[in-house]
Image: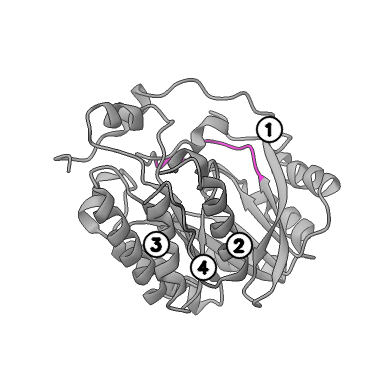
């Protein structure tokens, strides 16, 4: 475990260049199936919005790569959503992911809430990202404007307080719990992001703490958890890897966390499979293992384990 929190200055100094984004176009968009709160597989449109960089410079984050340095013009976010909806197939739910916090007024102008709400009012669920410390009355007002179910995705990251304090996230588990209490009291659903093997964590600790973090999230009223294997790729994480303070988790560890937490039947749990092949223990069975995880995400049920003679 490293001895103290790494500062904003160190994180910024380790960065490379940002990607060039258009403030009037989302930098990515897609539609993919997801097991919904209604216990059926339904399509979710995800719009990755181009906007100002998040002020919370978390140690493991690489989302800053597709952000602007300045606040985008009023009307730009609505135009991005309008453009995406014109391009994407019909879906039942929508995620508006903005590489930061939807209720950060420097990222999503408050003057646009009404126009955004009108654009997404036809979806059964509107899912946005937000930091626990930015959950307040604006969340309630936006749900009322939308006239549909709002779900806020928050990064718990880990319920292991010493590790959380080192991630430069500028929050505690109590902050997370208070945000959950407020949102649930106002009929806003909560989704949590949980990290698998953050820096300073062994493989075994990574699995155990991810499982405990999902348990903590469910105890706080969270209805859905996404387990994210920690990756290098933002500059500072590569430095930690060289210093032997960070190693990416294995795919089998992700399997272990998903298998255990799905067995509780307490809420939806998804394994983040973006570029999951990099975590493979064995190239002979990696595709089969990823497909099993994908099917478990969609069915929210345990499936037979993959048996591979090369892994024995």
Q: Which residue is mark 2?
A: 295
Res 108 seen here: yes
Quick check: is 265 in the magenta stretch? no
Tell me where residue 52 sits by quadrant: top right
Image quarter where the N terminus lies is top left
Distance of label 3 from label 4 (alpha carbons):
15 Å
Span shown in magenta: 48-56
Quick check: is 50 in the magenta stretch? yes
Left or right, residue 241 beside residue 218: left
Q: Secondary structure at mark 3?
A: helix
Q: Residue at x 28, y 61 (%)?
A: 208
Q: Tag on residue 304?
A: 4
Distance of label 2 from label 4 (alpha carbons):
11 Å
Q: List x then y, in percent, for residue 282.
A: 44, 43
Which residue in the rendered view is the most extreme toward the right? 86
Res 67 seen here: no
Residue nearest the viewer, comparing 289 with 112: 289
Give the mark nearest the N terminus, 3 or 4. 3
Give the mark nearest the N terminus, 1 or 3. 1
Give the mark nearest the N terminus, 2 or 4. 2
Give the mark nearest the N terminus, 4 or 1. 1
Q: Residues within 10 Å of mark 3 (few under 14, many from 20)?
A: many
Q: Tag on residue 257?
A: 3
Q: Which residue is mark 1?
A: 23
Q: Residue at x 51, y 46 (%)?
A: 286
């Amino acid at each position: 475990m490293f001895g103290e929190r790494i500062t904003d200055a160190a994180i910024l100094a380790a960065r490379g260049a940002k990607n060039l984004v258009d403030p009037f176009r989302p930098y990515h968009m897609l539609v993919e199936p997801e097991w919904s709160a209604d216990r059926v597989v339904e399509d979710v449109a995800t719009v990755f919005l181009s906007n100002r960089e998040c002020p919370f410079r978390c140690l493991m984050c690489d989302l800053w790569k597709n952000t602007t340095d300045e606040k985008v013009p009023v009307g730009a976010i609505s135009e991005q959503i309008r453009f995406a909806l014109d391009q994407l197939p019909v879906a039942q739910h929508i995620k508006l992911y903005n590489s930061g916090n939807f209720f950060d007024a420097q990222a999503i102008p408050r003057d646009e809430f009404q126009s955004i709400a009108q654009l997404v009012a036809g979806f059964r669920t509107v899912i946005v990202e937000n930091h626990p410390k930015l959950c307040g009355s604006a969340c309630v007002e936006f749900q009322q404007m939308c006239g549909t179910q709002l779900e806020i995705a928050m990064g718990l990251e880990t319920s292991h307080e010493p590790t959380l304090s080192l991630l430069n996230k500028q929050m505690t588990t109590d902050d997370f719990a208070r945000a959950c209490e407020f949102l649930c009291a106002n009929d806003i659903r909560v989704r949590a992001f949980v990290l698998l093997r953050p820096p300073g964590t062994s493989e075994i600790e990574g699995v155990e703490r991810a499982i405990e973090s999902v348990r903590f999230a469910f105890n706080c009223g969270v209805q859905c958890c996404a387990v994210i294997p920690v990756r290098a790729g933002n500059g500072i994480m590569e430095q930690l890897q060289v210093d032997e303070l960070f190693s990416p988790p294995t795919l089998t560890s992700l399997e272990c966390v998903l298998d255990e937490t799905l067995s509780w039947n307490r809420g939806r749990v998804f394994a983040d499979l973006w570029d999951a092949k990099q975590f493979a223990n064995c190239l002979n069975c990696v595709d089969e293992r990823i497909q099993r995880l994908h099917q478990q995400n969609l069915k929210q049920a345990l499936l037979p384990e993959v048996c591979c003679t090369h892994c024995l």
